[in-house]
Each structure stands twice: as structure tokens, then as C-alpha cells.
Image (cartoon, helix red, strand yellow):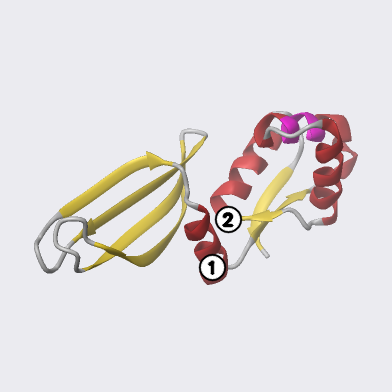
Amino acid sequence: MVFESVTYTEVCSSCGADLECHGAQVLVGGRLRWDVESTCSACGSALLVCGGDLPGERRDQMLSEHGPATVHVVSPSAGNVAIMRILRSELGIDLADAKAVLRRVLSGDCTGTLPEMELLARKLRASGVAAVAARS
């Protein structure tokens, strides 16, 4: 399991007090998920949300706090077509965008959270492309 976590403050929906939340982006079973847990210190209201999508502001917070991770193709001669096929499938992008992302992958400039990059590296490895995810 690969994960990154952040702590942030929200407003308690039960009493309006500041609520400390703990969120984690987790790579489990070949899928990314966003889990959040919190308990209000003022009223005791508890929240647990599992399996959601990572909110953009939490992704930005993770990247700021932990730094970006990159995916590196160990053997670029493995075939650009195979890499682009994975990029199009995983990222839901067209051929032109896949070519641009391919250039970023090959140059070591394709970044994201560690779970995101590990998922992409695993998909590439499953297609026979030697790839690793690492902190930049």
C-alpha cells in the first residue's frame, strides 16, 4: 500500500467549531482513493469518509507538504507506443496530449503525488515497461 496524508481544518457541521481532519490518498487494489477522518473536540461529532476523490486543494496541500513524486521509465527503448497507450487509458487524454505527457515521462518531468505516480508506474510495468515512482 502506498499513501500520503495531510491534516487540515474544516468547520464542524454539527456545532461550527474548528474540526481537525486527517486525510490520506491511498493506492490500494490498483485504485486511488481519498479517505478522511475527524472527531470534533467541541461536540464529539465524528466523520469517516472512505473511497472518495482527492479534492484539488488537498492534492495541492500534499504536493506542497511532501513534494512531488515522478515516474521514471527505466528503459525508454521499451516502446513509446506502449507508454502512450497506458497514458491515454489512465489519464483519459487524447493522442496529442499523450505525446506531450510521454515527453514529460521520458524526461523525468511527469509529477504528481506519490500514490498517483506509483499507480502509473505499476500500469506501465504491467504492460512490460520498466518504470519506477520516486520522490523528486
Name the mark on residue 66.
1
Residue drawn at (81%, 30%) of the image: 82
* Residue 39 figure quarter: bottom left
Disc 2 or 1, which lies upstream in sequence? 1
Name the mark on residue 113.
2
Which amino acid, by three-letter code, is at mark 1?
Answer: His
Residue drawn at (46%, 43%) of the image: 53
Q: Is residue 5 left or right of residue 40?
A: right
Q: Dividing the image into 4 quarters, which one contains the C terminus?
A: bottom right
Which amino acid, by three-letter code, is at mark 2?
Answer: Thr
What residue span does the magenta drawing correspond to? 83-88
Q: Can residue 46 be spotted in the picture?
A: yes
Residue 95 in percent (x, y) is at 84, 32
Query: Which element is circle 1 on?
Result: helix
Residue 52 in percent (x, y) is at 40, 41
Residue drawn at (69%, 56%) of the image: 111
Q: Is residue 38 above or below residue 66?
A: above
Residue 67 in percent (x, y) is at 59, 67
Q: Is residue 21 left or right of residue 67?
A: left
Query: Which element is circle 2 on?
Result: loop
Residue 107 in percent (x, y) is at 85, 55
Disc 2/disc 1 C-alpha distance (Å): 8 Å
Between residue 93 and residue 25, name the one nearer to us.
93
Asked if disc 2 and disc 1 are in contact, CB closer than 8 Å, the reply is yes
